[in-house]
Amino acid sequence: MANSRIRLQPLGGFLNPNREVYVGWDEGLQTYYAQVFDGRDEQGEDRLTVDVGNGLGDVTYPGGVITALRPYAEITDDLGELLNVSRVSTTPTYTDLRPDSRRYQQEQYVQAGLNRLYRPDGFVTTLTRDDVAPVLLEHGWASSGIKATETGHTETYRRGEQELTLAWTWPDQDYDTERMLSPIHLDGQRHGVDNREELSSLLAEGSPDPQILTPGSEERVDELLTGIFTDDEAQHQDRRLDAGPDEPWFDDPASDDEGFHSGLGT
């Protein structure tokens, strides 16, 4: 197990511009802790307004420190879960939940990007109705049914004994036209399709199946959607200090100019 610290957004920060609020797990003392600092006094000493969890085993559940901080900080809905996870982490962790934190903003940006890409039936591609319809006609696929879904609809096509299912998303605030989703379903197999050429090659009669989703690629999709954007950073003697030159830090998340790509669609 390892130490953790989480920095929270103070309530009424304009009244206390120097206020800093921290919560976390102290592995040495085996306790959760909560601290509120209100700048320094005339002697240069920290003004410690709240100091909970400074003794061995003082607070053993997250609610004990969360309650202590409610009058002083914005408490996020997942703070208790974050504290539980940090307690069992094998590496020191640091998380900054202030809205103006660059890392916090980056996580929100990343999540928004994933939300633009992901739908319950797959990932949004660049393929529109105008791209897909000629391919289906060229390779002899005939429509046999349509069904509404949570965010769009699915269409079924047949060619002899073969069956094809395509999922579509309705136009929304992110996309002004219908977009095909990837993967598509061909004879019970799922295939990742990224562009019109791949779709045409896959739907051609007697074409091979080079892009069937394997268990490994499915796991990669799961990794993309959960748990990859975390802030794991080294512990510090002073819980408020940034890392020094000799202390390791994990790499920052991707910069804003790096686009989102699922590997199954753009």
Image: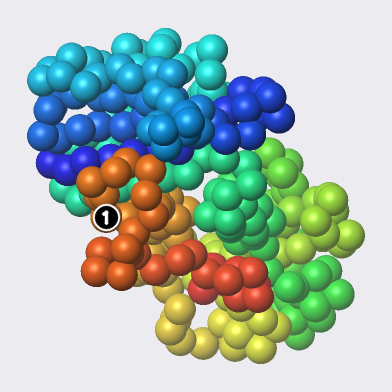
Q: Quadrant of the N terminus?
A: top left
Residue 236 seen in render: yes
Residue 11: image x %, image y %? 62, 23
Drawn side of residue 1 relative to residue 39, left or right? left
Drawn side of residue 144 relative to residue 97, left or right? right
- The mark total stands at 1
Q: Residue at x 80, y 56 (%)?
A: 174
Give residue 138's quadrant in the image.
bottom right
Residue 215: image x %, image y %? 31, 63
Residue 85: image x %, image y %? 28, 35
Q: Residue at x 53, y 55 (%)?
A: 103
Q: Nearer the viewer, residue 51 or 29?
A: 51
Q: Quadrant of the C terminus?
A: bottom right
Drawn side of residue 91 relative to residue 265, left or right? left
Q: Residue furthest front?
A: 43
Residue 158 seen in render: no
Residue tagged 1 = 234
Looking at the image, residue 29 lies above or below residue 203: above
Looking at the image, residue 245 lies above or below residue 111: below
Q: Residue at x 35, y 24 (%)?
A: 34
Residue 228: image x %, image y %? 40, 57
Q: Nearer the viewer, residue 239 or 95?
A: 239
Q: Residue at x 27, y 55 (%)?
A: 234
- Mark 1 packing: few (<14 Cα in 10 Å), some, or many (20+)? many
Looking at the image, residue 10 lies above or below residue 257: above
State the SS at label 1.
Answer: loop
Please name the colour scheme applied to the rendered image: rainbow
Give residue 135's quadrant in the image.
bottom right
Q: Nearer the viewer, residue 185 or 114?
A: 114
Looking at the image, residue 200 lies above or below residue 33: below
* Amino acid found under the numbered disc labelled 1: Ala
